[in-house]
Image (cartoon, helix red, strand yellow):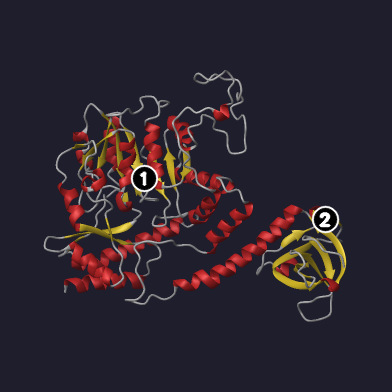
């Protein structure tokens, strides 16, 4: 028989039951050297298969040529290897879009099989002393992998349908003016600093302007300020919350102070009541580093919605992940288009990918000293970057977004377990605290050792039993080798900052931590003090 193309509907003398009956199939592969090809089973009986499989309707509207007497349903997980000699007739050929949907369904089913056979067993049983207790890690199921593979089949590559979906989901989540996906939390902080310094922004920041920020911080929260020649003004942090001491911010303000930039350390909200009040009374821009704090609230309001802008990180250690990635919550209308411009090369055009002339004046405007009517798509009003993500990353993010509530709940539960267990050791340890109006979304469980306890010995002891810990990021950032000579102003003394640098560490509370792991960690901490 002549070659049968992929998508051809055939009748063949083959049965899954072993009887010599004919069945309908749609061909989904080229024939091999033995004149065999794979066919997906077609049936008119959809109810029989609906629960176990995902039937795909095929009717005459989906045919490129030919005709079938009644609608049939393709059952992607029911396939047969068919020799060409068994084909009795060809009824038609499904169109390319339907072929794509059918092949995608087959690939998806195999991806799920791969997840169940390869990824799921690796999670295994926790064996104390042998299984490593990570401080963080990816938590996922088959949905992330299915999305990732489906996006590769689309082969969009650059930001596309998945990215658009995820940006809208986060925009709605925060009730923001705009939400911009970027390639990391660090880039999110960079984009926020760049936006404040854009000449398109009224009263924009200039070199030498001051930004108040805590001395206990992550390097790339501070670095963008230095890159834009802004002067950081460092304020001490509080033991227990590990956030900036909000009551000291107002005293740190000078004539050059233009902004406040606060991270919500380890998912624990800062005192936003005081901070917002100070910012409003002194007409200061307010930025939030919410990379650790997805879903945390203060006074019932999501952190990330108090300031002009806020950053998020989607690195594997964070609340949700897409491998690398981040985002900017934009709450200020004026800043929304500026931030978009800077993220996308600095261009003035705001057309979506593949769209043209959204403004209706693409060739009808004067820009700078360019010739009149210069193509708006190639006009650059800001010194920008390319900070965008790929659609494959966003595909993973879309699956992770659906798990946000579950992940946050699990983090809170793990935090509570540590807190209750470790209360018996408060003779040696300072346990975390939070503001009465704060509802943290914990990134970690911070602990400060009391006088007489050697932090280094404790964390090395835990490490010897396979228990990971982490310090509170850079500690006193001003002690770090790359930051020794930066331009700065220090308000007051940084006594708590020094203490945090020397005596504080944190344990992981990520959703992958089990009750057995937490109990094991607590037992080993208790053993250390015996």
**Where does the image place residue 44, in percent across and percent down from the top left?**
79, 66
Q: Which residue is drawn at 57% across and 27% down?
A: 376
How far apart, in angstroms, are the residues tagged by discs 2 and 1? Answer: 53 Å
- In the foreground, 137 or 450: 137
Task: List x then y, in percent, for residue 179.
Answer: 47, 41
The residue nearer to you, when weighing 340 against 207, is 207
Q: Nearer the viewer, mark 2 or mark 1?
A: 2
Circle 1 residues within 10 Å: few <14, some 14–19, many ≥20: many
Q: Which residue is drawn at 28% across and 40% down?
A: 273
> Which comes sooner in the sequence, label 2 or label 1?
2
Q: Quadrant of residue 194?
A: top left
Apparent side of residue 446 relative to residue 80 in the rendered image (left or right): left
Q: Is residue 131 left or right of residue 36?
A: left
Is any part of residue 305 visible from this angle?
A: no
Image quadrant where one finds the C terminus: bottom left
For mark 2, what is the residue?
A: 60
- Residue 303, which numbered label? 1
């Amino acid at each position: 028989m002549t070659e049968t193309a992929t998508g051809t509907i055939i009748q063949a003398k083959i049965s899954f039951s072993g009887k010599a009956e004919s069945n309908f199939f749609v061909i989904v592969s080229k024939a091999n050297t033995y004149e065999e090809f794979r066919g997906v089973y077609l049936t008119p009986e959809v109810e029989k298969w609906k629960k176990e499989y995902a039937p795909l309707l095929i009717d005459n509207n989906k045919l490129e040529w030919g005709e079938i007497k009644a609608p049939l349903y393709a059952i992607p997980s029911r396939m047969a290897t068919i020799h060409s000699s068994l084909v009795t007739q060809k009824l038609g050929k499904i169109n390319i879009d339907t072929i794509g949907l059918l092949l995608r369904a087959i690939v998806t089913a195999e991806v799920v099989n791969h997840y169940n056979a390869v990824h799921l067993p690796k999670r295994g049983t926790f064996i104390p002393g042998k299984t490593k207790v990570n401080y963080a890690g990816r938590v996922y199921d088959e949905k992330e992998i299915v999305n990732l593979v489906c996006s590769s089949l689309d082969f969009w590559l650059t930001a596309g349908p998945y990215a658009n979906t995820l940006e809208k989901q986060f925009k709605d989540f925060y009730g923001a003016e705009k939400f911009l996906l970027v390639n990391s939390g660090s880039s999110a902080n960079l984009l926020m600093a760049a936006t404040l310094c854009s000449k398109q922004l009224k009263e924009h920041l200039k070199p030498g302007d001051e930004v108040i920020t805590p001395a206990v911080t992550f390097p790339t929260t501070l670095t963008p300020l230095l890159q834009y020649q802004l002067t950081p003004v460092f304020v001490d942090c509080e033991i227990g919350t590990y956030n900036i001491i909000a009551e000291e911010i107002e005293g740190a303000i000078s004539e050059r102070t233009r902004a406040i930039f606060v991270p919500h350390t380890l998912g624990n909200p800062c005192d936003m009541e005081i901070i917002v009040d100070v910012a409003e009374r002194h007409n200061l821009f307010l930025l939030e580093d919410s990379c650790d704090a997805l879903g945390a609230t203060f006074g019932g309001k999501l952190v990330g919605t108090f300031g002009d802008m806020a950053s998020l990180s989607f690195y594997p250690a964070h609340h949700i992940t897409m491998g690398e990635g981040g985002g900017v919550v934009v709450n200020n209308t004026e800043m929304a288009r500026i931030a978009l411009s800077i993220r996308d090369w600095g261009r003035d055009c705001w057309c979506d990918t593949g769209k043209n002339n959204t403004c209706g004046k693409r060739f009808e405007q004067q820009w700078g000293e360019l010739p009149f009517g210069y193509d708006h798509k190639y006009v650059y009003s800001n010194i920008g970057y390319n900070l965008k993500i790929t659609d494959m990353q966003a595909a993973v993010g879309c699956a992770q977004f659906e798990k946000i509530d579950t992940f946050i709940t699990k983090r809170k539960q793990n935090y509570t377990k540590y807190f209750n267990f470790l209360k018996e050791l408060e003779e040696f340890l300072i346990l975390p605290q939070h503001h009465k109006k704060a509802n943290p979304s914990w990134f970690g469980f911070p602990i400060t050792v009391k006088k007489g306890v050697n932090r280094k010995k404790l964390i090395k002891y835990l490490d010897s039993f396979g228990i990971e810990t982490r310090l509170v990021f850079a500690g006193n950032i001003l002690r770090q080798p790359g930051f020794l000579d930066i331009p700065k102003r220090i308000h007051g003394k940084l006594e708590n900052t020094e203490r945090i640098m020397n005596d504080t560490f944190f344990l992981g509370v990520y959703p992958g931590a089990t009750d057995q792991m937490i109990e094991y960690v607590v037992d080993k901490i208790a053993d250390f003090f015996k």
